[in-house]
Image: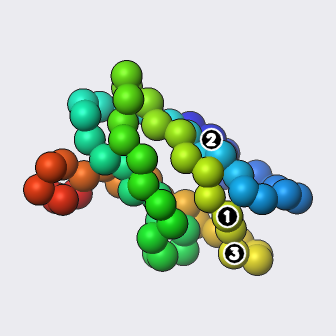
């Protein structure tokens, strides 16, 4: 998955990608704030997002058709 822990960026937006299963929706959160979503396709996802100044904790969660994590 990208980005890796501790990675530093000098330009925005950044690409966030990783593996997922099924036909689920992947939602990205940065420091607990919703940042965007994309569909899991062929076992992976990729989405562009901006960042807050300073440290950012990125979390990707998958959601089913009933919007359950």
Q: Earlier in the sequence, mark 3 or mark 2?
A: 2
- Counting from the top left corner in percent of width and height, residue 4 is at 66, 45
Image position of 4 with respect to 32: above or below: above
Q: Are marks 3 and 2 in contact (CB under 8 Å)?
A: no
Choose top left, top right, bottom left or bottom right for residue 20: top left
In space, the residues marked 3 and 2 are separated at their CA atoms by: 17 Å
In space, the residues marked 3 and 1 are separated at their CA atoms by: 7 Å
Q: Is residue 54 left or right of residue 2?
A: right
Find the residue positioned furthest to the right.
10
Q: Earlier in the sequence, mark 1 or mark 2?
A: 2
Residue depicted at 37% across the width and 49% down the height: 26
- Counting from the top left corner in percent of width and height, residue 14 is at 70, 52
**SS class of the residue under badge 1?**
loop
Q: Are marks 3 and 1 in contact (CB under 8 Å)?
A: no
Q: Which residue is mark 1?
A: 50
- Counting from the top left corner in percent of width and height, residue 10 is at 88, 59
Q: Is residue 23 left or right of residue 61?
A: left
Residue depicted at 46% across the width and 37% down the height: 45
Find the residue positioned furthest to the left.
66
Q: Can residue 6 be seen here? A: no
Residue depicted at 55% across the width and 47% down the height: 47
Q: Which residue is mark 3?
A: 52
Q: Which residue is mark 2?
A: 2
């Amino acid at each position: 998955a990208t980005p890796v822990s501790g990675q530093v960026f000098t330009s925005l937006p950044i690409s966030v990608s990783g593996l997922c299963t099924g036909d689920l929706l992947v939602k990205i959160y940065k420091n607990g704030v919703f940042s965007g979503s994309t569909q899991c396709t062929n076992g992976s996802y990729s989405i562009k997002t901006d960042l807050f100044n300073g440290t950012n904790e990125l979390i990707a969660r998958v959601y089913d058709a009933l919007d359950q994590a």
